[in-house]
Amino acid sequence: EEGRDLDKALDMIRTALAKEPDNPFFLDSLAWTLYKLGRHQEALAAMERAMDHRIKDAVIWEHYGDIAAAAGRKDTARKAYRTALELGPENPGDVKKKLGAL
């Protein structure tokens, strides 16, 4: 989250994914770390694998929106932010602001 030790985090996440390759929470962590590293297309691919599991978590949907927006996929970002809002994020004002900026 804080953008520190991202390479180490990436190694740890990949180790976890080697044991549970379809774990959507691990995939979200992978996507978020790649996003923080500026590797937006890779992040989007990982996030889409996580979303295949039909996650009902506002934070993960907000992450999806952030990553999609960074990758230039505004329609996908809008959908993700709207879904995050439906799921009741802790920070609805922030999500609405991101949605409005698209």
Image (cartoon, grey):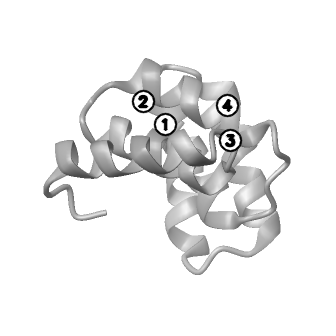
Where disc 1 sits, the SS reads helix
Q: Residue at x 58, y 43 (%)?
A: 65
Disc marking residue 48: 4
Depth check: 24 or 19 in front?
Answer: 19
Q: CA distance from mark 2 to mark 3?
A: 17 Å
Disc marking residue 44: none
Where disc 3 sits, the SS reads helix
Amino acid type indicated by mark 2: Ala
Q: CA distance from mark 4 to mark 2?
A: 14 Å
Amino acid type indicated by mark 3: Ala
Q: Residues within 10 Å of mark 1 (few under 14, many from 20)?
A: many
- Circles 1 and 4, Cβ within 8 Å, touching? The answer is no
Where disc 2 sits, the SS reads helix
Q: Residues within 10 Å of mark 2 (few under 14, many from 20)?
A: some
**Where's residue 45, x and y in %?**
57, 23
Q: Residue at x 60, y 26 (%)?
A: 74
Q: Residues within 10 Å of mark 4 (few under 14, many from 20)?
A: some
- If you read the primary sequence from the N terminus, does the residue marked by circle 2 or circle 3 appear first? 3
Q: Which residue bears the numbered disc 2?
A: 70
Disc marking residue 50: 3
The part of the image, by quadrant, that contains residue 93 is bottom right
- If you read the primary sequence from the N terminus, does the residue marked by circle 1 or circle 3 appear first? 3
Amino acid type indicated by mark 4: Glu
Q: Nearer the viewer, mark 4 or mark 2?
A: 4
Q: Which residue bears the numbered disc 1?
A: 67
